Amino acid sequence: MNYKAVGLREEEYQAIKELLGREPNESELRILGVMWSEHCSYKSTRPLLKMFNSEGKYVIQGPGENAGIVDIGDGWAAAFKVESHNHPSAVEPYQGAATGVGGIIRDILAVGAWPTACLDGLFFGKTPRNSTLSLMDGIVSGIGGYGNAVGVPTVGGKTFFDDSYEGNPLVNAMCVGIVSQEKIITSKTAKAGQLAVLIGSRTGRDGIAGAAFASAELAEDTKSSKPQVQIGDPFVEKLLIECCHELLREKLIASMQDMGAAGITSSASEIAAKSGTGIYIYADKVPTRDENMTPWEIALSESQERMLVIIEPENYERVEKCAQKWLLECAPIGEVTDDGRFKIINNGKTVVDLPAEMVGGGCPEIHWPSQKPAYLESIETERAYTLPQDAFRDICLSIISDPNVKDKSWIYEQYDHTVQINTVVGPGNPVSVIRVKENNKFLALTMDCAPWSCWLDPYNGGAESFLKAARPLWACGAEILGMTDCLNYPSPESPENYWILTETVRGLAQTAKDMDCPVVSGNVSLYNESPGKKILPSPLVGLVGLLETMEEFLPSGELEEGDVLFLVGPKKGFLAGSLFQRLLDKSIQGKPAQYTPTAEISFKERALRTAKDKCCSSVRVIGSGGLVTAIAKECVFAQKGASINLKSEHLVPEVLFGEGGPRAIYSVKPDKIAIFEHIWQDFGLLKIGTVQKEKTLEFLGLSSFSLLEITSCWRR
Amino acid sequence: MLYHIKVLVFLKDGVLDTQGKAVLGSLHRMNYTDLKDIRIGKYLQLWVEASDEDTARNRVKAMCSDLLVNNLIEDYTIEVDELS
Amino acid sequence: MLYHIKVLVFLKDGVLDTQGKAVLGSLHRMNYTDLKDIRIGKYLQLWVEASDEDTARNRVKAMCSDLLVNNLIEDYTIEVDELS
Amino acid sequence: MKACVVVFPGSNCDRDVIHSLSTRVKANVSALWYEEHKLPQDTDLVVLPGGFSYGDYLRCGAMAATAPILNAIKGYAEGGGLVLGICNGFQILTEARLLPGALLANKNLKFICRQCAVRAERTDTPFTSNLQTGQVLKMPIAHHEGLYFLPPNDLKQILANKQVVFRYCNNDGTIDDKSNPNGSVDNIAGVINKGGNVLGLMPHPERASEKILGSEDGGLIWDSIASWLKKGGRC
Ligand SMILES: Nc1ncnc2c1ncn2[C@@H]1O[C@H](COP(=O)(O)OP(=O)(O)O)[C@@H](O)[C@H]1O
Ligand SMILES: [Mg+2]
């Protein structure tokens, strides 16, 4: 068996021989091939992830464990993480997406939390080809099919369309769970002498070496290169959640790991490495579904719906009884030792004997060469745009009916978003809000990404990706507790790609730090490309914010008749990479929003005060499609008209269609205008119009739309 | 000529049959312990207009690979009856 | 003796086959206009331990009426293969 | 009120119903495991909650309908006890033949989760006694198999017996195709048995019993049951 066949590089193989002081045997080589793949080892991105600040006053647990955890008060905490399932979803959309949801829910479960809400980030090709449509259909049904059955509401998400994702769709699933701070489970607490118990489904030949597969570019013929497809069983996942929580209530769990990529190998070696112990796995004791599985197949199988639970040996019978109650397989498959070794033993014979440290953490970092792409030099300047008065109407309607702006209810109505009766503000709104029954507070959640900005200006695009997710939280009155992210990129092996990756992460990390937002968890997905096509840089940001009460919450889409509409922030947005530019020009050029820390901090403070002072009925941060789109969405949701009266100097594309930067529209109660103006003075404040009874949206001097016309363009 | 074609779709070996597993458990609980295993698939009945049996069969095969069967996880068999 | 039993479950006449109708529509859109109709049902394969074929068949019939088939909306046929 | 909520493997609205019943009408609610053979003494109400019992595999509700507790529930219902099946619970009751009909896949073959309006067709049942005839309730639906079906002759029967308790409608109470989210025959959203003590419905009252969740209309069903029990009502 050659090291190349398991995806290892020459220097990695040398490192293995050095660490071991011998040649690895075949089983060891296969295991290291998977564990040292990009997907499991983060070997290309570990140096980059160090840029993230993971400390803050709310942080209970930063990156490194199954999920990040933040303090939400009264002894309670929120655990959350986002994870990608891009490659599996490209091959088998329904199962790929479904098992993505299942995987992230188990991560939340693994820290002892109750999975409370999911969000999903989806990136699809834009041209409605049959292949794209059936892929979208499969992915959306897969997410719903799994989450709905498990009973975790999908309360929001992000859907982004661009042809770079044609054939390379992205599926990022995020889960948020609630846990009592005293009952958090970690993988650090295993002790020699304890028992490793596998609970859940039987082990089959599913997805063996799937992690390695996720670390390679998709070949022409994806179907032939794929491992056995993993099938999700949400029914078993639901039983697993109930069973693990019953074991937690009975205090039977010393440590726990979900089995994701690389199955038993990664979960067992991780527990041993983190706890500073060894672990022996008896392959013959693992309940299998398929006949004649080899020990390495058992060790690497990615069969879904399995957890590795570490317990005191005397508790085994109680654990087994609980598993049986929940119709789950249960088997004592290993033991924790004090020798630091990760061993796989089959029928008394040791087939794998490696230092536990080395399996999960031994892979040397790769420092790929980095080079600023040449294209960045040539696209710095954009052509000047004038507002084509006669085309204004058509442009507005095209933008409103662009899939990136259009109603996403066809997606989220396929997701159960009301189960668990905590969904106070559901999908369809810029932020989703769930109630925490445990302490009567509320979590506000967002997910966003700015791929075009990242492509035009990676550092500032990284910043904008964070800010797009953050501004709506500030505007609604929530304080941000922490962030999770999923870095979706093409191959890091191209110096240009690596440079973009580095710069976007730098921008993202700097902004999160400036805005006082710790990064507590995340995931990296590289090699999102197929021959001739690679994805835009897509750092997806998921944020969790806190609202003490709903009294402080400022909604969107709640315009009141007679309200006065204000634009706050810079009057002009940026056209580079905007929908306006993408619609009008074939080439995307220029400088997108430039990150200005002081302006963002000022926006944050004023927005939070605005929500607290209750001087507004509604707010909407300006996003894709610019000011016009934001106003149109407000009108559609509120089913109210508006009359917009802008000075001629403001009737320019940058004001009407520009994107990026801290800009928002507020619908201010007439008797509260003074308070509002006081809050926003010296920031940029422009009265733009009024909310009216008549169901029309008119832009004086330009054009007028009936609400019906806008609504029918926007709805699918 | 109208042909009546039966397609039996079943999961490939090794692919987890989530439905079958749950049904097996329930039947065992109901004391059908003489049931050793159960696999659940799809039964499609198609009525196809074609000049001859071979054409009918080939058309259905094409439909299977284009839409009806997910060849990553499923296999199928075809049976043709002549009708009129 | 182990028997392999195939049960074909199909919707009774008059019960709306929503899935079949949708698939028919899709296949027509994909230019399979020679397809006149399609009905979608279930294909169950059971492995039953029994002393003889009749017993096996009767056990499966019992499972069908107890769980596998809802006779308000579905009908079925059984086929038995002896295995060992 | 003493209520119990049956927990099947895969139920996922059991906690929601318990929360809703105990906060809205201060009911004494307990969870009841599906393998039990009898109900707790003095049970006033049995709820079969929503979810995906047995993963909704084979047919929704079919496997749960064979669970031991169903025999006890059948006996309880025969004695006039109140049984409410919500969503998956409704599917289970039809599979157990405690209610007529069957629930098939939604007309669009997709899962549908959204706020819906239903019209109360009867107010002389324990579950609707506090409502006005024709009153419109807003409650969410969340299901993949909610198309209520029964053969034409059976349909005539249940119409003649006035067994339809809720129909999907517009916000103003009119009943038409547009307000039918899933293709149910006759816009049927909820049916009751002949005895008038076993109700099944697809919308989720427990998801609409608090102001903060956007509707309190579902709470009116809990209120109805409570006041009917208080009056000593019998079926
Ligand atoms: N994949 C998805 N899953 C669930 N909800 C989604 C998804 N995509 C978008 N949404 C929801 O649709 C709404 C619209 O999203 P978006 O188009 O980004 O507009 P906005 O600027 O109003 O947030 C948001 O509430 C979002 O949560
Ligand atoms: Mg958004």
Image (cartoon, coloured by chain):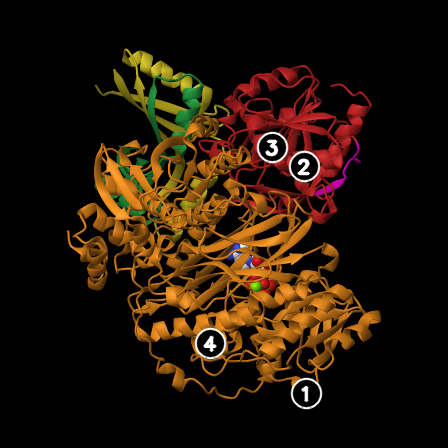
Chain colours: A orange, B green, C yellow, D red
> Residue furthest toward the front?
A338
- Residue that numbered label 4 is attached to: A459
Q: Which amino acid does label 4 sit on?
A: Tyr
Percent coordinates x, y for residue D213 in the rendering: 69, 47
Q: Residue C81, located in which quarter of the rendered image?
A: top left
What crowding class fits label 3: few (fewer than 14 Cα within 10 Å), some (14-19), or many (20 or more)? many
Q: In which quarter of the image is ligand 1?
A: bottom right
Q: In which quarter of the image is the C terminus of chain A?
A: bottom right
What crowding class fits label 2: few (fewer than 14 Cα within 10 Å), some (14-19), or many (20 or more)? some
Q: What residue type is labelled 3?
A: Pro
**Do the residues bearing badges 3 and 4 touch, measured as CB atoms within 8 Å?**
no
Q: Which amino acid does label 1 sit on?
A: Ser
Q: Do labels 1 and 3 share a chain?
A: no
Q: Which chain carries label 3?
A: D
- Residue that numbered label 2 is attached to: D19
**Do the residues bearing badges 4 and 2 touch, measured as CB atoms within 8 Å?**
no
- Residue that numbered label 3 is attached to: D49
Q: Nearer the viewer, residue A267 or A241?
A: A267
Q: Which amino acid does label 2 sit on?
A: His
Left or right: B27 as drawn, with respect to A547 = left
- Tell me where the magenta segment starts and ends, as one range: D130-138
Q: Which residue is drawn at 71% across and 82% down?
A: A682
Q: Nearer the viewer, residue A25 or A91?
A: A25
Give the spatial CA distance, label 3 vs label 2.
Answer: 12 Å
> Is label 2 or label 1 in front?
2
> Is residue D197 covered in magenta?
no
Percent coordinates x, y for residue B2 in the rendering: 31, 38
